[in-house]
Amino acid sequence: MRKTTGLILVTTSALLLSACGGGGMFNRNRPDEFAVQRQAPLVVPPDFALVPPAPGAPRPNDSSAAAQAQSALFGAPQPRSSVETTVGGKAGQAAPAIRSTVGDPQTNTVDKGEVARDIIAAPEGDGREAQTAIGGN
């Protein structure tokens, strides 16, 4: 049994190593794909009339890649509808320091209790994995 296993191992190793050899249809002597067709020489177009940009003029492609992608996906900015203008007018302006006011430890907050905290911290999903616990603390 040991001789058979050894013979199979040696034979398999020899076959694997023989695949590393060159020759046959897998040799590296292939035709050059660039030599198949002659390349045309580079030519300067006859109407090569570029005008240098005026000093201080905006560049023709001065937008960022993100702005170009957004314009390609969604089109140019559209004017606001009357409903959007009305809602924006009724909402008013936010306080300029609203972000620092909200993060301030002196800001007064209202504790809505553990139920509201549990609802807000609930995992996303359709509720199939929801569990109910009966009892109190």
Image (cartoon, grey):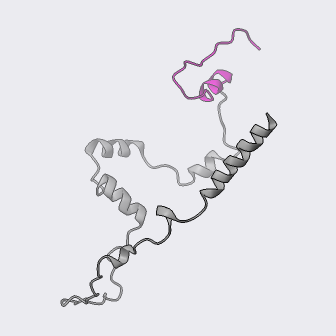
Residue drawn where x is 65% and y is 31% of the image: 110
Residue 16 in the image: state x and y as whole percent.
64, 52
Residue with the most extreme top position: 134
Residue 72 in the image: state x and y as whole percent.
32, 57
The tally of labels here is: 0
Point out the image quarter for the C terminus: top right
Magenta stretch: includes residue 127: yes
Horizontally, residue 96 falls left or right of residue 38, namely: right
Residue drawn where x is 31% and y is 87% of the image: 53
In front here: 84 or 130?
130
Residue with the most extreme right position: 2
Horizontally, residue 72 falls left or right of residue 92, namely: left
Residue 59 visible? The answer is no
Residue 94 in the image: state x and y as whole percent.
49, 49
Horizontally, residue 36 falls left or right of residue 30, namely: left
Picture quadrant where residue 39 is located: bottom left
Residue 80 in the image: state x and y as whole percent.
29, 49
Picture quadrant where residue 37 is located: bottom left
Picture quadrant where residue 1 is located: top right
Q: Which region is colored magenta?
A: 113-137
In front here: 47 or 136?
47
Magenta stretch: includes residue 16: no
Residue 5 visible? The answer is yes
Q: Is residue 54 above or below residue 11?
A: below
Tell me which secondary structure the magenta stretch mostly adopts: loop
Residue drawn where x is 69% and y is 9% of the image: 134
Q: Is residue 117 above or below residue 24?
A: above
In front here: 121 or 80?
121
Q: Is residue 116 above or below residue 38?
A: above
Horizontally, residue 70 falls left or right of residue 49, namely: right
Q: Is residue 68 above or below residue 49?
A: above
